[in-house]
Image (cartoon, rainbow, N blue to C red):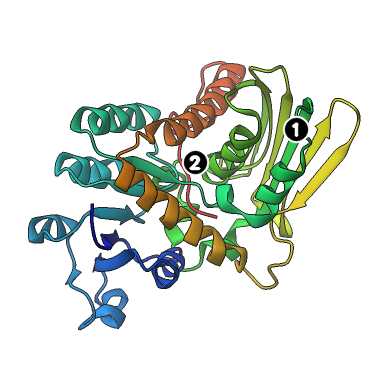
């Protein structure tokens, strides 16, 4: 593929500004169209790139090489499915879908169609996490990983109030922050399975805190701590090596100000997505792996509750 990769964005919610800015850092990737149901969200782009109120009209207009999907979680499956059917590579905000069955179907369809299906895990590109991984001595045995993902959800949702609706979000903290935290664990130790979990729900039945224990194929263990009711924001990673060495990375370190770490992370997302599209790589597994872990936590909770009425039978999340 020669020339700049022409990318459209469907959905101009709170995360879209990080994608839009990232285009400025990547001369070989071009913002070529935007789509949103709200006229006021489209207004800043009028006269600069084609604007659409319906993503199906964007598809029909042509002229795109790939699309970023940044719509509410409950419509990820529909929008991504239509884009894949049209032969367009997709970068979708995590989660891949709110139901694991839909995620599996999307991966199947993308592979059958031969198009890239890429889930955006922005923490995978965090400079401090990448530095932490680089600091692990060659050949060192990793014993344990702890990832903390703690925040006050109401401070992060902005105007995207659908985050606070479990049916639209796919659940609570496990569905929303779980995918990023699980992907960080996978980035460090590879494939993992859930060995134990504890979920705490509020009076409305939404999961607000969770502790998830995982085990890697290497035998290394991991713990993910999630909190939607935390005063402030803490997002960090701790590694314990077999010789007792402890290495720590603060995801927010050096990025003063609310959400400022996301600026460089989304440059990484867009760069990696463009690379995958140009190479025609199969990237479906990562998004599905995170969704499977989320679903397993909810399944375990349901089984522990007996009839399963305490836990939603879907899985998903947003982008923080």
Which residue in the structure is indicated by mark 2?
Answer: 171
Q: Separation of disc 2 and disc 1 at Cα?
A: 39 Å
Please tell me which of labels 2 and 1 falls first in the chain.
1
Which residue in the structure is indicated by mark 1?
Answer: 138
Name, please, the residue furthest toward the left.
60
Nearest the eye: 133 or 290: 133
> Element under label 1?
loop
The picture places residue 62, in percent across and down from the top left corner, at 11, 58
The picture places residue 8, in percent across and down from the top left corner, at 26, 61
The picture places residue 64, in percent across and down from the top left corner, at 19, 58
**Between marks 2 and 1 in the image, the one whose residue lies nearer the viewer:** 1
- Rendered image quadrant of residue 116: top left
Image marks 2 and 1: residues in contact by CB distance under 8 Å? no
Looking at the image, is 93 positioned above or below residue 35? Answer: above
Name, please, the residue furthest toward the right.
244
Point 83% across, 33% down: residue: 240
Q: Residues within 10 Å of mark 2 (few under 14, many from 20)?
A: many
Point 27% across, 44% down: residue: 80
Taking the image as shown, residue 38 lies to the left or right of residue 27, namely left
Nearest the eye: 69 or 113: 113
Taking the image as shown, residue 316 lies to the left or right of residue 144, namely left
Residue 217 numbered tag = none
Taking the image as shown, residue 257 lies to the left or right of residue 8, namely right
Point 17% across, 61% down: residue: 54
Looking at the image, is 30 positioned above or below residue 320? Answer: below
> Element under label 2?
loop
The picture places residue 88, in percent across and down from the top left corner, at 21, 47
Point 62% across, 18% down: residue: 304
Looking at the image, is 24 positioned above or below residue 144? Answer: below
């Amino acid at each position: 593929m020669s020339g700049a990769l022409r990318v459209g964005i469907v959905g101009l919610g709170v995360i879209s500004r990080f994608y839009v800015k990232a285009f400025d850092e990547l001369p070989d990737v071009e913002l070529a169209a935007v789509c949103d149901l709200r006229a006021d969200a489209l207004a800043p782009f009028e006269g600069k790139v084609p604007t659409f109120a319906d993503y199906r009209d964007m598809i029909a207009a042509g002229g795109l090489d790939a699309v970023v999907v940044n719509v509410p979680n409950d419509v990820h499956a529909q929008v991504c499915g239509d884009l894949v059917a049209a032969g367009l590579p997709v970068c979708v905000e995590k989660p891949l879908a709110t139901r694991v069955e839909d995620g599996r179907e999307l991966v199947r369809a993308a592979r059958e169609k031969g198009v890239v299906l890429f889930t955006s895990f922005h923490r995978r590109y965090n400079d401090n996490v990448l530095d932490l991984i680089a600091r692990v001595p060659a050949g060192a045995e990793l014993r344990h990983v702890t990832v903390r993902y703690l925040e006050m959800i109401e401070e992060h949702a902005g105007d995207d109030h659908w985050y606070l609706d479990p049916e639209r979000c796919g659940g609570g903290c496990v569905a929303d922050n779980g995918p990023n935290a699980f992907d960080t664990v996978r980035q460090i130790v590879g494939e993992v399975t859930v060995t134990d979990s504890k979920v705490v729900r509020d009076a409305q039945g939404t999961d607000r805190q969770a502790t998830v224990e995982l085990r890697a194929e290497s035998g290394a263990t991991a713990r993910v701590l999630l909190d939607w009711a935390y005063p402030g924001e803490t997002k960090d990673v701790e590694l314990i090596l077999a010789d007792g060495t402890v290495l720590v990375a603060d995801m927010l370190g050096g990025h003063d100000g609310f959400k400022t770490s996301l600026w460089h992370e989304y440059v990484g997302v867009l760069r990696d997505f463009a690379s995958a599209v140009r190479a025609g790589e199969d990237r479906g597994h990562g998004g599905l792996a995170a969704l499977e872990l989320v679903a397993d936590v909810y399944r375990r909770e349901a089984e522990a509750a007996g009839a399963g009425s305490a836990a939603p039978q879907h899985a998903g999340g947003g982008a923080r």
